[in-house]
Image: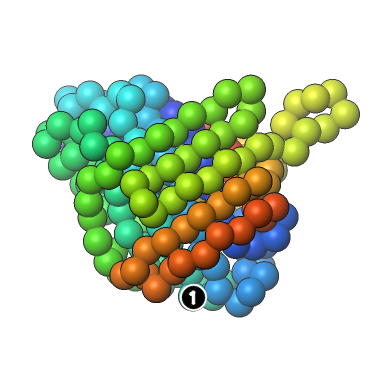
Amino acid sequence: MSYRLEGSILEVCECKVLCPCWIGEDPDNGTCRSAMAYHYEKGVIDGVDVSGITVAFAAFIPGNVLKGDWRVAMYVDNNATDAQFDALLSVHRGERGGPLAELVKLIGEVVSVERAPIEYTVRDGKGRLTVGQTVDAELEPYRGPTGEPTTLVESIFSTIPGSPAYVGKANKFRLKNDKLGIDFTLSGHNAIQGSFSFAS
């Protein structure tokens, strides 16, 4: 079983900027409620082409991110075929090894898996993510004196292992999931963007 996946992520959470989870510290509020999405620009999983498909998560992290026991709801793009859905599900369950399997070890419970309409765009460094009625977020990176995005590297935790992350903030972040007991709207909190290349 193998995969090769290239793409980008958008991630938002209720922590202030910068999210302490990425450097192994406890969340600002003791727990963390977040949303993230992996957009696969190019990808093949055991011969199944998943290019153009997005997988998103709503998550509740009960304490320090490295201690795991996350509770997550998983969403697969409505545009995915049954074969793409099954292939992506297997990768995000950790069944095919590689970097994503290491991340899956932190998940204690998957409360639901469902299809949803997902909007995922990044233009001029500004990102937008919507997942059905669950997530609505707009985010942008911080930039350095040259205009390039501010980057975080060699962090102890990452949702894109091996790749730099672009530190930013969400101008808008709406997250609602009844199974996770989450319902809030925030502005000006943590956001992360990044690109990745995963293989197993």
Q: Is residue 75 above or below residue 34?
A: above
Q: Is residue 200 above or below residue 183?
A: above
Residue 114: give x, y in percent of width and height.
Answer: 22, 51
Residue 166: give x, y in percent of width and height.
Answer: 65, 38
Name the image quarter holding the C terminus. top left
Residue under numbered circle 1: 62
Horizontally, residue 33 falls left or right of residue 156, namely: left
Residue 50: give x, y in percent of width and height.
Answer: 26, 28
- Residue drawn at x 54%, y 68% is 32
Q: Identify the residue at the far right of this view.
A: 145
**Quarter location, residue 193:** top right
Q: Is residue 134 visible?
A: yes
- Residue drawn at x 35%, y 38% is 118
- Residue drawn at x 15%, y 32% is 81
Q: Is residue 153 visible?
A: no
Horizontally, residue 126 falls left or right of residue 183, namely: right
Residue 156: give x, y in percent of width and height.
Answer: 61, 56
